[in-house]
Image: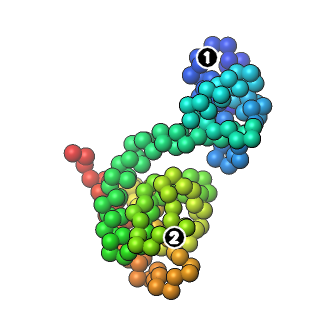
């Protein structure tokens, strides 16, 4: 949060950034007054900025509450690592999907949830098939494996979602395939760029 005196020599961009920075992942919408308090800006300023951000799709307004807009999500997808990660993962995910017939998803951690950044849809579409950008609970049942970074730390997770109502879903057979595919993605990601 900015200090009380910071508004004296700031640009419009500083104010817009303060408004956007005021949102937290766990927010269920924010009123203008709360947003102004968090951004340490006058309510009238935040109201004008919010109206402009809504018009541009960067924020959404519903019943007087403001939410991060879909356009911000789209801009976030353009960030280099997720773009490179998707490029490295999609061919491997497609092979895994073709070999198993299952929907394969690639997710990254975001606090207690995971955000889907790529999907290769399987033969069976279900209501639970995730869309890119959707959030899923971190502990959602799935056969998964970490995609390792150069350091060995997990940068993403490759998963085949477990469908509880399917008798032909065999996690024990899928797990080795998912582990190999995740390792291949990590290798492709670490390969020198051409």
> Toward which corner of the image does residue 56 lie, by quadrant?
top right
Q: Is the residue 95 above or below the residue 3 in the image?
A: below
Q: Which circle, 2 or 1, is nearer the viewer?
A: 2
Q: How is the image coloured?
A: rainbow
> Toward which corner of the image does residue 48 lie, by quadrant?
top right
Q: Residues within 10 Å of mark 2 (few under 14, many from 20)?
A: few
Task: Name the residue furthest bottom.
Answer: 167
Q: Position of residue 179 (x, y in %)?
A: 39, 71
Looking at the image, is mark 2 or mark 1 earlier in the sequence?
A: 1
* Residue at horizontal 57 percent and vertical 35 percent from the top: 58
Report which residue position mark 2 lands on.
Answer: 126
Q: Position of residue 34 (x, y in %)?
A: 76, 34
* Residue at horizontal 78 percent and vertical 31 percent from the top: 33
Task: Name the residue furthest right.
Answer: 33
Q: Residue 130: in sight, yes or no?
A: yes
Q: Quadrant of the N terminus?
A: top right
Q: Position of residue 31 (x, y in %)?
A: 75, 36
* Residue at horizontal 42 percent and vertical 76 percent from the top: 175
Q: Position of residue 106 (x, y in %)?
A: 44, 60
* Residue at horizontal 66 percent and vertical 35 percent from the top: 22
Q: Quadrant of the C terminus?
A: top left
Which of the two residues, 150 or 7, is positioned nearer the viewer here?
Answer: 7
Which of the two residues, 48 or 83, is positioned nearer the viewer here?
Answer: 48
Q: Residue 40: in sight, yes or no?
A: no
Report which residue position mark 1 lands on.
Answer: 10
């Amino acid at each position: 949060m900015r200090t009380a005196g910071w508004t004296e020599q700031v640009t419009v961009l500083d104010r817009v950034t303060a408004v956007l920075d005021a949102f937290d992942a766990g927010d269920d919408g924010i009123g203008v007054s709360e947003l102004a308090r968090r951004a340490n800006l006058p309510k009238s300023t935040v109201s004008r900025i919010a109206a402009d951000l809504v018009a541009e799709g960067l924020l959404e307004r519903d019943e007087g509450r403001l939410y991060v807009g879909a356009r911000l999500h789209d801009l976030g997808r353009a960030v280099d690592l997720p773009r490179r990660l998707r490029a490295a993962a999609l061919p491997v995910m497609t092979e895994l999907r073709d070999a198993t017939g299952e929907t394969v998803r690639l997710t990254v951690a975001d606090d207690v949830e995971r955000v889907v950044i790529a999907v290769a849809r399987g033969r069976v579409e279900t209501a639970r098939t995730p869309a890119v950008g959707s959030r899923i609970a971190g502990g959602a049942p799935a056969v998964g494996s970490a995609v390792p970074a150069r350091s060995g730390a997990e940068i993403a997770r490759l998963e085949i979602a477990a469908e509880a109502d399917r008798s032909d879903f065999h996690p024990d057979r899928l797990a080795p395939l998912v582990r190999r595919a995740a390792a291949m993605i990590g290798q492709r990601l670490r390969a020198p760029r051409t």
